[in-house]
Amino acid sequence: MTDNNIILGANQYGKAEVRLVKLTRDTDRHEIEDLNVTSEVRGDFNAAHIDGDNAHVVPTDTQKNTIYSFARDGVGSPEAFLLRLGKHFTDEFAWIDGGRWAAEQYGWNRIVANGAEHDHSFVKSNQEVRTAVVVKDGDKTQVLAGLKGLTVLKSTQSGFEGFPVDKYTTLQETNDRIMSTDVAARWRFNPEAVDADFDFNKSYEDVKALLLEGFTEGFSHALQNTLFEMGKKVLNAHPEIDEIKFSMPNKHHFVVDLSHFGQDNPNEVFFAADRPYGLIEGTVLRENASDAGNVWEGVAGFC
Amino acid sequence: MTDNNIILGANQYGKAEVRLVKLTRDTDRHEIEDLNVTSEVRGDFNAAHIDGDNAHVVPTDTQKNTIYSFARDGVGSPEAFLLRLGKHFTDEFAWIDGGRWAAEQYGWNRIVANGAEHDHSFVKSNQEVRTAVVVKDGDKTQVLAGLKGLTVLKSTQSGFEGFPVDKYTTLQETNDRIMSTDVAARWRFNPEAVDADFDFNKSYEDVKALLLEGFTEGFSHALQNTLFEMGKKVLNAHPEIDEIKFSMPNKHHFVVDLSHFGQDNPNEVFFAADRPYGLIEGTVLRENASDAGNVWEGVAGFC
Amino acid sequence: MTDNNIILGANQYGKAEVRLVKLTRDTDRHEIEDLNVTSEVRGDFNAAHIDGDNAHVVPTDTQKNTIYSFARDGVGSPEAFLLRLGKHFTDEFAWIDGGRWAAEQYGWNRIVANGAEHDHSFVKSNQEVRTAVVVKDGDKTQVLAGLKGLTVLKSTQSGFEGFPVDKYTTLQETNDRIMSTDVAARWRFNPEAVDADFDFNKSYEDVKALLLEGFTEGFSHALQNTLFEMGKKVLNAHPEIDEIKFSMPNKHHFVVDLSHFGQDNPNEVFFAADRPYGLIEGTVLRENASDAGNVWEGVAGFC
Amino acid sequence: MTDNNIILGANQYGKAEVRLVKLTRDTDRHEIEDLNVTSEVRGDFNAAHIDGDNAHVVPTDTQKNTIYSFARDGVGSPEAFLLRLGKHFTDEFAWIDGGRWAAEQYGWNRIVANGAEHDHSFVKSNQEVRTAVVVKDGDKTQVLAGLKGLTVLKSTQSGFEGFPVDKYTTLQETNDRIMSTDVAARWRFNPEAVDADFDFNKSYEDVKALLLEGFTEGFSHALQNTLFEMGKKVLNAHPEIDEIKFSMPNKHHFVVDLSHFGQDNPNEVFFAADRPYGLIEGTVLRENASDAGNVWEGVAGFC
């Protein structure tokens, strides 16, 4: 406490965006893992803030070194790697009782050369960025898997009708439009359902495929409608996942009026707008979902 | 509720990044206000998600129109403008009981031409982006002011010593280094202390000046130490502010080793690194601060 | 001409970044083309610049409209589309004798849902951005195809040895390193070898595959060495291409020293650096290449 | 030469984006210079490309080291610093007969704290980025100064009338609109008029002020018209500058139609659009300007 009863509240610190590329070279057929790792610890850091006493401040440089050292023993999956990091920092330092560890992972495909997948040459996928978060709070541990930047588009089977009209409404109803979004989603595992041996990589690929499949299905009455279907599809197939959050722009594609030029435009020529865009955010979860604790704090928007 | 007891959880939607430029042309000396406004409403949207029934879905296009229409009567300050928007949507639609309205504002200075400030010509400042958030939750209203991208640097009077050492520590102590960060901060007003007549623009300019001044003062033992001093300075001067949160990168500037070239380097030549960077996040608040409700949910990191 | 003999030199103007999405809906199996088109015209625009007389200034808005109107009749390939636009503007307006038309094209794949490629749902590829440029100068027309942002990595079979050493040299030789780059390349067609019927889409896919294959082959003594091999491979297979230019960063991956932590690091754990980076730019061409005219002017760097 | 008469054409290579912060600490009142430097050399590099022989390849790492070592003796101005670097590389290595050296420089202001400018605390300006290029080609040296990202706006005294109308024209004439652009400009010095003692910093500040002033003056009949006036103003005041090139977006601000809501809109409420935008590029030069050599090659667009 200080003068005027001004105190330190919630805080965390660490090293952000540690760019890690891990090769596995056990055989001539190399493997690559490409991550961007952030480590932030929580605990008793009052003295550092208030008195300038750094006795508890495990340097952010040390956190970076630890990430690289741990990677020497393999990554495996971003979630498993973050779980190992979180356990280390909370076990090692008495005054660190929690933290937040996060990663982005970038996909690489083997280059196909002379008719075959190459052993040690790769091309970056860029289709989406995989995300992972581990939050530890005392003896509780939460894991979020996720992705962002997965851009999808339906060229029909989407409309928007039956909405309320007020004095500011000028939008016309439509029963055939382009629907496009950049999927950003994070899903939370039931803490009791996953452990260090859980195959997070297989789970990720399956959830991604379900999200894509869910996007294609049915007639979409609004992006909200599609969001819910996508979430339900994931939860129905994966009992170990308790909830999933989405933040999805409605990327407007406007039909260009070509009548001035003597042309029709039966939903063929579109202007793809940048801003503004719709923003649809929501949570799909089990009625009896486990307690999420503080895991969603500090997550931007809904994702 | 649906099959397998899968339900809709927290959700919100609206129009994001509505780019608004408002001129005031009452006299030959024009004024300009330049904002990027996002409106998201909360309430009962179960039918839209689950049944594809849009009767409650006030179109995001309508939200955009409302923003432009309200701007015709003036902006004033981003906080005041968002308060008006939030009141409108929650008053107007029975099923909307809250929401989140956010804005960025960009500063412009008058161009100095032929020795005088010009009446209708402006140059964008870009020094920082001003931010504002209003969250309504039933009959409670919270206001956050803030800024981001305010890049500062101290060329001395900063060190980092006395930190704990473990097997992963390779960092050396220093008592003279560059300290640089991009200040991102948000401060929360006591709901009872501010109303529609509060001068948010004057308050903003004053808090910004205090943050800059706080950054300069004293010897910094760590960025945490400076963060706390900056926050304390704001709270001491502004009784209407209950708490302030910071998210600040430690932008590393490494002294280049020139000894191989026969040169010394007494902290004069630095490599400014991009990634990784330290990330220092914390809250400074009054011991008896008002309840923050859910206003910090969905704010990325600490800001 | 004006006072002090100050004159207008080279100039061009138009509409940039016209975002065009074109659907083909002739059957239930839709096709999508997604482009970002820029049109700039050249000619006699002295009066507009010097006298404020706009009689020659075909509005940039008109150029935008023309792009959308032409798209109604199909895109085909970015090169063919730009050729049509260029012919239109130079034919239509007596004072327009040339110009530069450019496009980016973004790839989309069909979503695989329930075991099959979907008819009207797509996921954006993002692996690279395809680029195209048409320059008209009087009766001469040049076509550049290209790509950018194709990120590749070889985990071995790359080294850098035998370089000159001076007083500023501290780099150590290596015969095993990661080599990674973002391929940006543009290739120029022999004007006599291509016409409106040339299959630019097929050509593009083939050149991209050759660039990837060329990257994988052999031991790379330097990125310059690989650049030349990639270019040679393209020219050997495509007689209609006269030259190819590359601008490629050497994206450094530094082996992390883990010895302080009691670990070896046999090229397995790397720090992927952002800046600075090497930058390797070069041209591979036929000794008897056709005259390039002014087509490369205004192309940033080498690409 | 290789098989099929495929040869190496124009090429250059080096280290890009070397982030350099230089402090001057001779007194308690520190000075800061903040640059992003790129060095690329040109010469005989055939063996490296074709044969994998690196005997001529001065490492990009060495170029980086040289930049930092030279900075120890001071920067002065980006132009003067690049001239020193260019002279070094062309003097030192027989096979290097030219090159391109470029820099961005970022401005910092002193923080005003407790009523006075602080001695060692700074806030980044961000108003614009200063640019500089030196190109050496044999015994010829060219210098370009410049800036980018200087965003300006006039709220009146701009129109667009008298343009040609064709079947694709839908734009209406206006005699009162917002005109806004991001000024990017580069100006070329007469090689005989500048030497190592020329005060490039003073010249830069003066040219920037003239560009701003030129933007404010008179009624703009089109951005082309304003471009020419801005260029003429610079050349009239600076006999040592032979030409100036501009690349300037016409950042559209559309008047929002509020009539549906019962409101007028006398040019007060605007939608600031992102894409597409007009793009106006042009050169203003002296009739008897010195020969530019190859200095403009590789400069993107017109700037």
Image (cartoon, coloured by chain):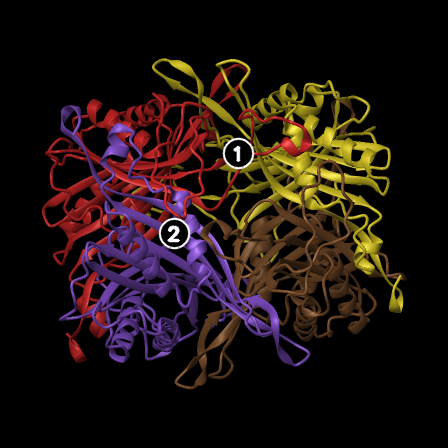
Chain colours: A brown, B yellow, C purple, D red
Q: Chain of mark 2?
A: C
Query: Residue tagged by mark 1?
Result: B158
Quadrant that contains the N terminus of chain A: top right
Give C194 or A248, whichever is nearer the viewer: C194
- Above or below for D149 versus B242: below
Query: Residue tagged by mark 2?
Result: C38
Query: At 60% from the left edge and 63% from the top edge, which residue is drawn?
Result: A153
Query: At 32% from the left edge and 59% from the top edge, which residue is drawn?
Result: C133
| Outermost residue toward the bottom in this view | A115
**Image position, residue D39 (x, y; %):** 27, 50
- Per the model, the C-alpha gap separating discs 2 and 1 is 50 Å
Q: Are marks 2 and 1 on the same chain?
A: no
Left or right: A211 as drawn, with respect to B155? right
**Image position, residue A160 (x, y; %):** 71, 55
Specify the quadrant of the image occupied by residue A75. bottom right
Circle 2 sits in a helix, a strand or a loop, which is it?
strand
